[in-house]
Structure formats: C-alpha cells, structure tokens
Image: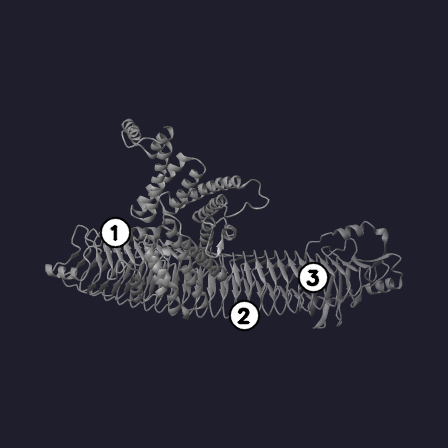
Amino acid sequence: MADSKMTDEQSSADAMEEDFQVFTVAPPGESADFNSVQAALLAVMDLDQNSCRMRISIKGGVYNEGQLEIPGGVQIVAAEGCELDSTSPVIITARADHAVIASRSKGAVIRGIRLEHNGPFGSMACVLIESGDLKMENCVVTGSVSIGVLIHGDASPTLIGCEVLVCCGDGIKVSENASPVVSQSMIHDNDGFGIFCTGNSAGVFKENEIYGNSNAGVAARGSARGVFRDNKVHDGKQGGFWLEEEAKCELLGNDIFQNQKSGIQVGGTANPNVVRNTVRDGLKGGIVVHDQATGTFAHNEIMRNTMAGVGGTDHACPLFHSNNIIDGKGGGIVLHENCGGVFEKNQVVGNTHAGIGLKGSCNALFDSNYIAEGSGYGIWVQERAMSTLQNNVIERNMRAGVVVTDQANPTLAVNIIRDGKHAGLLVRHKAKGQYRQNTLSHNAHGNIVLLEEAASEIIGNVISHGPLGGIIIRGNTTVTVRGNTICHNDGANIAVLDSSNPVCDGNVLTNGAGRGLVIMDRATGVYRFNMIRNSELAGVYVGRQARPELVANCICDGKAAGILLEDEAGGHFTHNIVCANQNEGVAVHGRSQPVMECNVVLQGVGGGIWLDENAGGTFRGNVVEDSGVEAYRSPGPSELSARLAERNTNTAPAALAESLSEWAEEKMQAPGGKKKVILVQNPDASPDKGVGMATQCSELLGLDPSRSCMLVARFLGDAGQFEDAEELINRTRGFLGESGALMMGTAVRGQQFGDMALHCAELLNKWAAASPAYSNDLMARAAGYSLEAARIFSSLLPSDTATLDSFASSLYWVGLNFATVCRLGGCGQWTAQEACEIADEAIDVALGMVTDQTPPHRVAELYFVHGVLSFCKAAALEAGHVRVPEGMPGDAAQVGKALLEHASKTMGLAYKHWCEAYGEKHLQTVKAITMIALLERKLGREEAGIQWYRKELRIREELQGELHPRTQQARRTYTSIIDEQLSRNRMEPQALTAAMAAAREGAGADPSPAVVAQLLVDD
C-alpha cells in the first residue's frame, strides 16, 4: 500500500476538532453511537449540516454494507489506532450490484478505510463518484468483480495516498467530463487498465506507481486530456501508456519501464505531449506511434528496449525533438508504411540494429540528429521509403553509415558521415536518392559505394580520407556525380568499375594517395569539367575495355602520368587541360585505342603524349608543349611520332600556356572556384575571335551556346581581351532565346539569365577600369546588367545557397557600378543622385544579409563597395553632380573630406579581410590596394600614396603580367605621379640623377620608390 502522508488540509482539520460534530461507529457489541455506517449516515443527513461539520469515526472491523451515499461536508475516517496498517483496520464491503461508496456532493472526505466489493461479477464499481469533489485519503480500494474507482459526469475528486488493486476491471476509470486529481497512490494488479480515461475527461495524475495491470498501465481514449506527471508505470502486461482515438494527454517526467509491450503506444488520431519521460527496459518497443496519430515527444530518455526505441507506422506523423534513444536491443527509430513526421536533434546511440530504419513508403524529415556507435547500420532506407535526412551526424557505426536499398529514394543533405567500420554511404539494388552537400570521411570500406543498378545523384559533397577510396561505382549504376570535392583518399578518389555509366561533372579530385579517377572493366560514362590534381599515381587511369568520354577536365600536378590508358581501353578525350604532371601528360599503353581531340598538354616532365608499340588511336588538333623532351614519343619507327605530330599543334605558344595556367589556378583558389567550369580554347578556331571558338565548343561539348559564350567571354576578359569578350556578350542574349534554355523550367531560365547578367556586369566594369578613362557607355551598360541580375536573383529567393550567393554578388556589383555612375555625373538613364540612391539601397540590403557565418571575403567585398561609394560621393560633391543632403552639417568640401576619410578607413578593413582570405598577392586584394593609394593622395598623404601605388604595380606585374591592360593602367598611374612630383618640385634631372646615385652608393642597391619620393619632397 502507498505510504500514508498527512496533507496540509488534514493537519488543519485535525487541529480544529471543535469545528466537527463527531459520531462513532463500531461493530455490533461494542460501545459506539452507531453499529453501522449506514445508520450513522442516515442520522447525519437528518441534522442541520449548515450548523457544523460532521465526522463519522469508525472503529476497526468488517462492515458488510453497500451503496453508502456520503453527504456533502461529511468525513468518514478510521478511528485512531484503526489505520490500515494496524491490527484492526476498518473494512467496508459489499456484495450487492451497487457501489460500496457513492458520492455526488461537495466537501465529502473518506480517509484510512479499506473498501472491498465482492460481488456479483460485473458490478459497476467499488467506488462511484458521479459529481462533486469527494476526497479520498490513504484508502485501499479492491474489487474482485468490479472496477475499483469509477469517476464520471463532471466529478472532480481527489485521491491521495490510496491503493487500488486486484480489481476485475480497471483500477480507476475516468469518463465523460470528469477531472480528478490522483496523486501518491498505487494502482496495481488489476485485470483491466490501471487508469482508464475516456470521453472528454481531464485531470492530473502525479507521483503514482502503476504496475502489474493486465492491460496497459494507463489508457486514454475519446478526447481525454489528462496530465500524467512523475508517475512510475511498470510491469504492465499490455504496455505502459496506451493513447488512442483523439486523446490529447500530457505525459511529463514519468518513469516507464519493464512493460511487456510498448512503453508508450499512440494510435487513432491521438495528439499527446510527451516530455522528459524515461521509457526503458521494455520487453518490446519503447514508443510506438501508428494509425493517424501525431503528438510531440521531446527530451525523453528511451533506452534498453528489446525492440525499436521509437516505432512509427501507418500514416502517423509525430514530432520527436531532443530525445535520447540509446542502447536498444533492436533499432533506434524504425518507420514503416506511410509514416511521416519530424525527428530533430535526437541522440540515437549504441543500438543493436540500425540507428534509423525506414521501410515501406515512409517519408519523414530527420534534421540535426546524432546517430552513432550502433552495431548495425547508422541509417537504413529500404523498400520504397523516401524521407529527407539533413544536418545529421552519423559516425562510428559497425556497418554502413547510411545504406539505401531496394527502390528507396531518400534525400540526404548537409550530413556528416564519418569513422564508420564499413562504407560511409552504400546505395544498391535499384535505389535512387539525392545526396547533396554531405561531408564523408574516414569510412573503412569507401566513403561512397554504389552497386548493382543504383541511380543516384551525388552533388556538392566533401569526400575525404577514405582508406579504400572516395567514391566506388560498380555494377550497372547510372549515377550523377557533380560538384563534389573528393580528396586525400587512400584509394582512387573516384573508381568506376564493371559496366557503370556515370556522369561526373565539375568535381575536384585532389591529393589522392592513389589515382585520381579510375575507369575499368566495361565502364563508360561522361566526365566533364573536373579538376583532378596532385594524385600520387595517374590522374586518370582507363583500363581493360573501358570506353569513357572525358571533356574539358583539368588534370594537373600529378606525381605520375596525367592520363594513363592500358589494356584494350578506348574512349573520347576532348578539350582537356593536362599539365605539370611528373610523367607523361598522356601515356597510351597496351592495345589502347583512344580518340584525343583538341586537348592541351603542357609541362609534362616525361613528355607530352606517349604511345606504346601496339597502342594506337586518333589524335587530332591537340596543343602539346615542347617541354625539353619529345612532345610525341613512340617506341616504334620515328615516322610514327612524326605522323602523330602532324595531326597536332607541336608547341603551345608561351602566352597561351601562361594564361591557361594562371586562369585555372585563380579560379581554383577563388571562393566557389571548385565549381567553376574550365573551358579550353580550341586551337583549330580563329585565334583573334571568340565567336567561332564559342560556337565550336558548344557543338563539341553539347553545351547551350549562351553558356559557351559566357564562359569564353569570361576567359577572354580575364586575359584582357575585352573587345572579343564584348562581341560575345552582344550575341549571348540572342543565343539564350535560340537555344534549349527556353524549353527549361522558369527557375532554370531565370538562373541562366541571372548568371549571364552578373558576368556582364563584372566584365564591363573591369573593361572600364582598365581604360585610361572610364567610358560612360560601358558603365551605363555595366550598371544595367548588375541591376538586372539583382532583380532576377531576388525573384528566385528563397532558394538554395548558390542562388543566395549569386544574389549577394549581384548586390556587390550594383553598389560598385552605380557608385561609379554617380561619380561620373550620371550615365544612360540614371542621374548621379539616382545612381547614388540605388547604390545605397543595394549596400543596405547586402549588409542585412551578413551573419556570424559570413566568410571574410564576403565581408571584405562589403567594406570595399562601401568605401568606393563614399569615394564616389565625395567626387560627385566636388564636381557638383550631387548636393549635400539636407540636415547634414558642413559644406560640400567638409562633407567630401569626411567621406574620403570614411572611404580610407573602410578600404583598410577590406584590405585586411582580403589578406585573411587570400593573402596580399591576389587580384581581389589588389583592388583594395589601388583604392587605398588613390585615397591617400586625395587626402594629401603623398608619400603613403606612392608606396601603395608601387605595391599595386608590383603585384599586378607578378599576377597579370606586364602586358595586361590593368597592369599598364597601374604603370601609367604610377609614372604620372612621379612626373607630377618632378614637375611640382622642379627638380632638375641632373640633380635627381645625382641624388639617386648617392642613395644607391649608400644602400648598395637601387633606391626604393619611397626613397625617390622623399628626395622629391625634400628638394
């Protein structure tokens, strides 16, 4: 029985005995006011109950009575010394088909009494409370043929410290609109439920112990909405809690353990709130949600259950948040059928089977969970299951971190899958799925393995440090591998075997301990725009009877051959850059018969293209550098090498080799550079025009002509060939309407238009900046393109990270281009004032997008464009293009000076952040250097300005070459400053020569620009 606990109300009542009129009851033959409880109650009812409170004190014994109706305000208590644990307790029994105790009144109390109902079988209840607020304290209720306590109507009784046991039905049943408080009681060994709530009942059930009942410890149906707090519910024959129909109960802080079925089962359309419970050591599952149930399950400890810690089936759709699901003997979370729901921030650790198992056609969201140290799979998606799994950490599982089988089709995004004892991601059978922006590393049997007929999309992932390799593609898979960074794997970064036919686009394969890309057996596939660098063995290996197609890849800096073909391999290789590899650029061994057209092979230590005696193939239009050994080598007759050379361009012009190498390196180092497409000039096209080149590349690569034009225009613009780039830009918009882009979806076309406008905005700005004087026409078009790009990307939001990044870039160019338009006094359709306002608005929007995660190079861009705008405003004020804003103190000169000081400060910050992101010798950083030099001169700090201009010139010479238009512009600027100093100080050339000679003699070397500047100032 529960411990007897004296409540505050009971203590208060006992302290005021004088408020009660007490009647005594004793068994026949003993001295008392009455010899039956019924007689005492009848007497009490005849009295004026308003004059005083009534108490019936019952001495120990057995009273065979029944249907005792307790009036309002009356207390029935065990006499002193006759408590339940005494040798002479009070027992009231009944055998008739009615309750032992019934109550409909308010203020009634029954305390310290045992109530028994012994028949007939099927009687309604031992205690019946139809209304009122009866209070039962420290009572025992048992009924071998009935329900223990039946509470219905609108009753709101209180049971505290009671024991309800061995009833043939439910221990406590609450129905209709009843709302009891049951606390510190024991409800056990009943043939039905321990507590059964139905109808629209409510109530609070706290600190009870509910165990050993034949059905569930607690059941709720109808629209029951009781609150169960801090109870112990254990050893139920049918489970702990069973909630169904439309129940909306709250389960808070309960300890639910060792039940023979589920600790908590939720069905129907129930919608409970289950928070901070412990569900443990069950002989079946922990929590099961089925039918169309929902509910919120948060901060629960679910552990050591025999079957799944959490199970979902049918059309259930629960929310599981921040639960610990650990050490289960089955799976952690298992979903069947059409189950949905949201599972976020759960810890799923140490389970025997899969941490998360998805079957049937379930489709749930798993976000920010931790799945680790399981004896089985981390996540197993099978049958036709879908589901989205994102931001999860999956590590140290004994089998695959994630396995996808049968015809499953999940989406995995931004997960970390690492340190598995098997594969990181295993996709097999006919499974599909999208796998985006995940990080996979240190998985023992390969970071990603695709088998049989898998047809997945592997996009934008980082895949590294795999002992057996990065991505292993086998069977008849038709996977798409795009935009991934695959590095530092001990085996091949990508291995394509059997009869696989993947599409691999825009990946970076770098620093592999083995080969970069391996294609073997009868594998085929298309491999485009990949960067394959720093491989310990061949950058690309093609063996046996493989027949791949490699287009526009960059294969460089390898410790062995760039491309190695063996056995009877073939394939088509076009527009690839193969450079700076330690062995041959291309080595063709065995009986290989490749087709190689329009490739560029540079700086191969072991030569350009090498053919074995039995090898052959077609070699046409390749550019091969003469790097000190034979560009073409063959162990056969010398005329074979000669014929091979006749079909190709024997030596790459130095300028072409230099520009290709610098351009590729710059794109790789730039943020997002791993996703840039590297497109090589076709040497058969006209060297002085880009249109033919773009069109031919479009035909060869299968690209949309507009995309080809934009890529080539970008290449030409970086090389300073702005006129050719302009010609391509003029054709690009027409290409977009004529090409397949019109058949694409609206979002795809919008993205293409936006990319095109953004490229044009950047290109025309650089062209204008490289000119001796800014062209108003160029800046008007640059401003228009930037505004168009911003509007397009704004219309696509919210979207993916790439679109958001493009929107930020477009805002940067809007600010930069319109600031320049303001400085020029207006261009095209915009006045200087309008341009100033557009730039201000763009910068404000960009600043609003800054977060703690914004990378340094983006922060630097914002500082830079803010500084440019301040500088341009000052120049526009000085020229009279704009007015001092109303309310701003000072005249135009004072405001202009303040704007220049602000520009100088922000440019210093831009320089600092770009140095952190790229270092000083970078084309982004040099932009800040140029502006700092200009501002120093504007602010009268001549010597500092000369130092910064000299730094700009030195860096541009090193990065862009002496003939680049921007380098020539920097040299013109620096020379004009020196000439201006000479003119201003009127220093005779002979005097300057003598001073410099003296400085040279003193220093032992040519004087620095700073020394020259000081000589000019001191004169």
What is the distance, in whole Å, between disc 3 and disc 1 at their CAs?
85 Å
Q: Are marks 3 and 2 in contact (CB under 8 Å)?
A: no
Please state, as top left, top right, bottom left or bottom right, where the N terminus lies in the image.
bottom right
Amino acid of disc 2: His
Amino acid of disc 3: Gly
Q: Nearer the viewer, residue 101 or 278?
A: 278
Q: Which mark is residue 655?
A: 1
Please state, as top left, top right, bottom left or bottom right, where the C terminus lies in the image.
top left
Q: Which of pointers 3 and 2 indicates the residue nearer the eye?
A: 2
Q: Are marks 3 and 1 in contact (CB under 8 Å)?
A: no
Q: Which residue is mark 3?
A: 203
Q: Nearer the viewer, residue 594 or 629?
A: 629
Dividing the picture into quarters, in which one does residue 127 lie? bottom right
Dividing the picture into quarters, in which one does residue 71 lie? bottom right
What is the distance, in whole Å, between disc 3 and disc 2 at their CAs?
29 Å
On the rendered structure, is 572 left or right of 366? left
